[in-house]
Amino acid sequence: MKMLKSVLAATVALAALAGAAHAQDKPRVAFVPQLIGIPYFNSMEEGGKKAAEAFGVDFIYTGPVDANPVDQLQIVQNLVNQGVEAISISIIDASAIAPVVADAKAKGLKLFTSDSDAPDSGRDVYVAQASDQGLGETLIDELVKRVGEDAKIGFVSGEATSSNLNAWIKIIQDRVKEKYPKVTLLEPQFAGGSSDRAAQLASDLMTANPDLKGLIAVASSTCPGVGQAIESAGKVGQVVGTGYCSPNTARSYIKSGAMGFTVLWDPAALGYLTVWAGKQLIDGKPFVASNEVPGMDHPIPYDEKTGILLLGDPTVFTAENVDSFNF
């Protein structure tokens, strides 16, 4: 099964490259998500396509069929070998990408991160959804409002090596230590990219901790599993689910009360900004402190010290506003 998944991932990558090969007159910008086929990354793909039309590039979207760092790395290396001018990655394993970055630079290509970073890899820029600080603090502040300042809270995350997920967990832990000393945070559980595994872990946490008051789905792929587990356990109203979940993924759980709210950003806008950043890198245009991006309704800040382009502030989705969003 593992070999089959690897073959499928490689086939997807080669198909995407073949589709782009007919139009070598345009520069190419690729985005490699952590896995394909989930609403969050589908939305990033749609935003990337719009930006490609707007900025005159060919957009390549290809990634592993599950959140497997080895498969992802192979796909990125294939893109580098094909000479794709700008390649962006939602990093699964931050420790493994540096050699590929070095190879890309040696070939005169631009390799950068989007959605999940590898800050020590030598990447050209990181296109961030919102500040890690803002995301972590917004989520835990909103959750404590609902469960109280002496609650027990669990985590169900994705891949244990994902830098963005681990950064949010750490910020939540630091915020609790500083502001909510009576809150008990359980050790994070890691489900990989599997919603079924997330549901099982969430169920196990509730069984082992009958006094559990909150469950945080740290990865978008774990959101349905957490919501489903709370409903199946009959814990709606007793355990408040939340997480970094798109409105479409979490809508039914927000409306049922299994999830009190979710926190995220617009991934289509993130995909759009990613392709714009790739075109800027290809053209050799430097990022400035405040960037005007055609097609976006607000300036995009850039931190030269960290090399981060920031999409904006996080959004809180609730039963009152969730139907105003479609991604």
Image (spheres, rainbow, N blue to C red):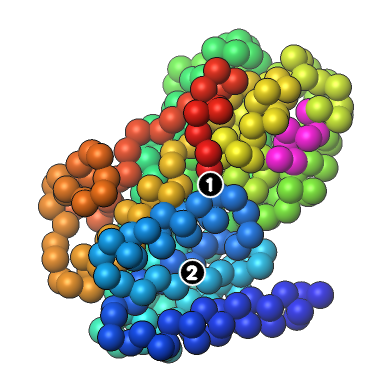
State left or right for residue 12 relative to residue 17: right
Q: Which of marks 1 and 2 is in front?
A: 2
- Label 1 sits on a secondary structure element that is helix
Amino acid beneath label 2: Tyr
Q: Measuring 63% from the left and 14% from the top, which residue is drawn there?
A: 147
Q: Residue sitting at 29 percent across and 66 percent down?
A: 278
Residue linked to disc 2: 61
**Of the residues shown, which amino acid type is indicated by label 1?**
Leu
In this orientation, which residue lies closer to the viewer: 175 or 223?
223
Residue 231 visible in the shown view: yes
User: Where residue 75 sits: x, y (%)?
Assistant: 53, 78
Q: Looking at the rendering, which quadrant does residue 106 occupy?
A: bottom left
Magenta segment main secondary structure: helix
Q: Where is residue 3 in the image (x, y as percent from the top left)?
A: 75, 80
The label on residue 206 is none
Q: How far across and down, in percent of the image, does residue 8 sit? A: 68, 78
Range shown magenta: 224-230
Q: Distance between the residues labelled 1 and 2?
A: 22 Å
The residue wearing badge 1 is: 165
